[in-house]
Image: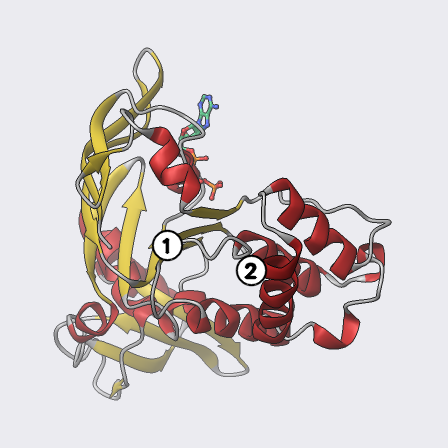
Amino acid sequence: MRLEIESLGKQYSEGLWGVRDITLRLGAGVHGLVGPNGAGKSTLMRMLTTVTPPTEGAIYWDGTRVSESPGVVRSLLGYLPQDFDTYPTLTLEEYLEYVAALRGLDSETASARIEALLDLVNLTDVRDRRLDTFSGGMRQRAGIAQALLNDPELLVVDEPTVGLDPEERVRMRNALADTADDRVVIFSTHVVADIEATADTVTVLEDGQLLTHAPTESLIKSVDGDVYECRVSQSTLEQLGQEFPICNTVQRADGVDVRLVAEDPPTTDAEQVTASLEDAYLQTVTHAN
Ligand SMILES: Nc1ncnc2c1ncn2[C@@H]1O[C@H](COP(=O)(O)OP(=O)(O)OP(=O)(O)O)[C@@H](O)[C@H]1O
């Protein structure tokens, strides 16, 4: 299975492009799509899911041009949109049975599939509970289950961790990673830490442009040895901020603990620390500006 995106662009109005000139090749696995608000993540996903047509360029699934045969992608697609909503008065099981019927699954296939998916997203115990009693994280995992009902080869999830507490974020990430063995999973977020543990590749978008696309490990390695932490005064922090990407700051009684990306130690007592995806992301975004 292979998703190819060739010079893809979407223009909303004169001079306003949601994304432009995006070229990517994605195989089975989890692919993280990150970027700040307005970067173009949702625009790209809406084109991948055939919700909106591209203005230029093309998308191919296993060599078939999607705009010429949108039904091909729709039949193998699972989609969890950002504004996903459920039917509050149905129980989880009733809801999944309803969606399965809408997708044309026969009842035997549907019940086997529902059983497996409840287990995958860890909601078997609450199958008889009404959806309006679910937490945000449970609702999102129910969303993943509905998106997987037809066993899609392409699963697209738009910001599935928004509004979730840390424990629920981890459950959500694990559920996504567990689905990715034999499908292409595209996971968009503006929280870089959400994809560090789960994504095989990372794609960084900003202002509609593709800044980088690389295996997660190699993106982290690109800043290995260049991440430092040190305690500095507020005025030194301001100077450092002019020169280096600042990854994090924590106020202390006697100064500010700062984490930054620099080729050489930024202060005499700076300590080199293990690089994270967030450091690599900040370096990528800062370099582009
Ligand atoms: N339907 C639309 N009509 C006009 N402009 C749009 C439309 N949808 C998005 N845009 C614009 O396209 C650009 C990319 O937006 P998009 O929603 O794709 O970004 P995003 O990365 O998903 O952002 P967020 O993280 O805030 O959801 C922005 O400038 C946005 O204002």
Q: Nearer the viewer, residue 27 or 196?
A: 27
Amino acid type at circle 2 is: Thr
On residue 104, the disc is: none
- Residue 77 locus on image (x, y percent): 43, 46
Q: Nearer the viewer, residue 31 or 230?
A: 31
Based on the displayed image, in which of its 4 quarters is residue 222 positioned?
A: bottom left
Q: Secondary structure at mark 1?
A: loop
Q: Secondary structure at mark 2?
A: loop
- Residue 229 locus on image (x, y percent): 32, 81
In this rendering, is residue 41 above or below 277? above
Residue at 84% across / 65% down in the picture? 129
- Residue 75 locus on image (x, y percent): 42, 41
Residue at 39% across / 72% down in the picture? 198
**View quadrant of ligand 1:** top left
On residue 161, the disc is: 2
Q: Nearer the viewer, residue 227 or 21?
A: 21
Q: Residues within 10 Å of mark 2 (few under 14, many from 20)?
A: many
Residue at 78% across / 71% down in the picture? 126
Alpha carbons under labels 1 and 2: distance apart: 22 Å
Q: Which residue lies under the disc numbered 1?
A: 153
In this rendering, is residue 267 above or below 84? below
Q: Is residue 50 left or right of residue 226?
A: right
Q: Split into 4 quadrants, where in the image is the N terminus?
A: bottom left
Amino acid type at circle 1 is: Glu
Q: Split into 4 quadrants, where in the image is the C terminus?
A: top left
Q: Is residue 2 visible?
A: yes
Q: Nearer the viewer, residue 242 or 167?
A: 167
